Image: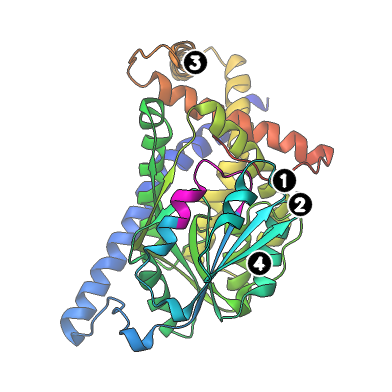
Amino acid sequence: MAAPYVFWTCLFLVTYTYLLYPCVLFVIYAVAQARADLRFLTTRRERRRRPLAEAELPPVTLIVPAYNEEAHLKDKIANVRELDYPRDRLQIVFVSDGSTDRTNEILEAGDDPGFERLLLPRRSGKAIALNRAVEVARHGILVLSDASTLFAPDAMRQLVRHFADARVGVVCGALRFRGGDEFKQTEGVYWRYETSLRLMEARLGATLTASGAIYALRRECYRPLTPDDVIDDFVVPMRARTLGFRVVFDPEAEAVEFAGESVKDEFTRRVRIAVGSFRALRELSRVPLTPVACLSFFSHKFLRWVLPFLLIGLFVSNLWLLDGLIYRAVLAAQCAFYFWAGVGFLVRERGRRVPLALLCYFLVAINVAFLVGFVRFLSGRTDTAWQRAS
């Protein structure tokens, strides 16, 4: 009978994805950190990447794609003007991807001669907008950001200092979110968990993905994206690895992003990410990776993508296995989790604080989003043009 094999396989992989992998990663991280500390004590070589002097700062092209960003665009323009980076070494390119609100009007009204504007006549998707912007980029270092993202004043300096090492191809910045009460109880909790994993992976040289809102790369690492390349912040760093470059994460290069107003907004974004993930899986699985990076890709990416199927397999197989105490206990735990997620769904807009209910609802929602994304991937739907989550 296959049910026990399906049950134990799914139970192990679900537990491993959320609980065991962070523990394994922490042990590897602790050993690596201890070795680095010992090496520092014996050699006294500075481990931190030093800031670049003013004369050492390289010319940079900042690219900001936008689609219907009238709510945030003025703040973004003001934020760019306040960046602590020499303006004579900074090219700024805003590209509007066929926006239908006041985005183009706001961009055209700007009187700063240092701003370049590309107003695309029709909506083609973020990938095509980035391609057009890269075509007009004049410098060898590209910094990519979103129109709703606000950089810390020194974020650009923190990012570009890593390119003093010729082996570095992509530098990923750290993103912090601002959101309401629902966000704080759902994605806010999840993002703190994600950030801790990314930080440990970065210390082990296993950074795989960037936050699309803040990352930098060498121009030679950029390959023109296709409309199917929905997750550019994953595809671009992985392609840089294929070219032999390192991908690093700098938690000191900070930016702030405004989160979606609700789990519903995040659901829409996750569906789009799921479609892009499954489309890119074949290419990404062929990228040469170190053993730790392979572990990260399998545990932190691939298993997350297939987790909805593992959850379904666990629940269905458990229904056939009720003759043992452990089986009944696991089924009871699953039912309690889904019930609590349902409670979270019911109280999401009523301002009530039910412990962990909104978080359970969020976890179920993002896994359902990946199921929807997988169905759209199989159906060959091409409506992957980006849109705001909020």
* Tag 3 near tag 2, CB within 8 Å: no
Disc 4 target residue: 133
Identify the amino acid type marked 3.
Answer: Phe
Residue 124 circle label: 2
Element type at mark 3 = helix
In the rendered structure, which segment of residues is drawn in magenta?
66-77
Q: Is residue 154 magenta?
A: no
Numbered disc in front, either 3 or 1: 1
Q: Is residue 74 magenta?
A: yes
Residue at image coords 33%, 63%: 153
> Which numbered disc, 4 or 2, marks the residue that appears first in the sequence?
2
- Asked if residue 4 shows in the view, the reply is no
Q: Residues within 10 Å of mark 3 (few under 14, many from 20)?
A: some
Please state the horizontal and vertical placement of residue 287, each as a whole percent of the image: 64, 67
Give the labeled residue for mark 1.
385
Q: Is there CB contact under 8 Å for labels 1 and 2?
A: yes
Where disc 1 sits, the SS reads: loop
Closer to the N terminus: mark 1 or mark 2? 2
Q: Foreground mark, 4 or 1?
A: 4
Check disc 4: other Cα within 10 Å, few if <14, some if 14-19, many if 20+. Answer: many
Looking at numbered disc 4 in the image, what kind of residue is underneath it?
Answer: Ala
In the rendered image, the vertical position of residue 289 relative to residue 284, given as above or below:
below
The numbered mark, 4 or 1, whose residue comes first in the sequence reads: 4
Q: Nearer the viewer, mark 3 or mark 4?
A: 4
Is residue 34 toward the left or the right of residue 168 in the image? left
Say which residue appears at 35% left-offset and 50% top-offset. 196
Q: Residue at x 62, y 32 (%)?
A: 369
Q: Residue at x 60, y 38 (%)?
A: 269
